[in-house]
Amino acid sequence: MKEINSAGARIDIATPKRTKDIIGKHGFSFKKSLGQNFLIDMNILNKIVDAAELDETMGALEIGPGIGALTERLAQTAAEVTAVEIDTRLIPILEEVLAPYPNVGVVHGDVLKVDLKQIFEERFSKVSKVSVVANLPYYVTTPILMKLLEERLPLQNIVVMIQKEVADRMAARPGGKDYGSLSVAVQYYCEPELVCTVPHTVFIPQPNVESAVIKLKVRDTPPVQVADEAHFFQVVQASFAQRRKTIANNLKARFFNEGGREALEAALQEAGIEPQRRGETLSIAEFARLSDVLLAAGRV
Ligand code: SAM
């Protein structure tokens, strides 16, 4: 049952006392290897939930509910909530603390392995839109986000707490040290926006890296048209393979082992890109043009 204090008010999970009570009662110990840093600050939780712009017609998918601090707030805000948790020890705790919320379903599994399309069909068929809202386990942030985006799930937006350094890379514009293949991949699918940076003190235990909340507004269509998406991402990867090398040298190593310099220079000229530029200066539109030119020239 939901905890009620002596004055009859409900007690949120995301407070230091309630969190300590729940983990103490169940004898729970944190596993660093699963990225377990639980939120104990309602202000940050509210910022995350507000950024997701949920309403009572929408669904929320949470990854890694922990002991349910964020899940509880999502249940109070959205029509349907599904939370995927890998740690078996947390399942009975979640069942107990979330018992007052019939609109919450907990799936026990590894989010990288579960069938998200099936979850969407089973859990979100009646909602208007779905957002992903999570305090992600930092050790698998990028694989989780790339799975969500590459599967092209019908998402409105993704609002997640992640390592600040990763958030900076996702939101980076061309020309700086943070801009790389992750920036291009994320911005191909979404419009990123940094919501806030987050102090260590809002977690138990405290992580030893800086954190930030990022909002990824999922695009209806990519900002550029490419002939072959997989090839486009290969060109992006190759262009950042060795950051200090020029675009010409990086592309040569991956696409021009045979046929050499002249063909490479012709391709770059056709794409309107100076050979001495570095990958970090190219916009998404330039990567798209480059990919189409290389593909047409049979460089795959
Ligand atoms: N949402 C809770 C909160 O904010 O207090 C907990 C967040 S904690 C940073 C990350 C959660 O993700 C933990 O509960 C952890 O067990 C879970 N987790 C780690 N790897 C996972 C995976 N591959 N699939 C699903 N859950 C995972």
Image: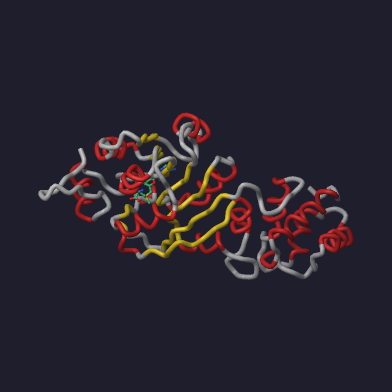
**How is this picture coloured?**
secondary structure
Q: Quadrant of residue 171?
A: bottom right
* 151 w.r.t. 191: above or below: above
* 163 w.r.t. 151: above or below: below
Left or right side of 241 for 144 = left
> In the rendered view of the protein, which quadrant contains the N terminus?
top left
Q: At x 57% / y 66%, what residue is drawn? A: 178
Q: At x 47% / y 49%, what residue is drawn? A: 140
Q: Position of residue 64 (x, y in %)?
A: 39, 44
Q: At x 76% / y 57%, what residue is drawn? A: 253
Q: Nearer the viewer, residue 238 or 195?
A: 195
Q: At x 47% / y 58%, what residue is drawn? A: 214
Q: Nearer the viewer, residue 279 or 191?
A: 191
Q: Position of residue 86 (x, y in %)?
A: 39, 39
Q: Position of residue 278 (x, y in %)?
A: 71, 67
Q: Nearer the viewer, residue 106 or 79?
A: 79
Left or right side of 215 for 81 = left
Q: How many marks?
A: 0
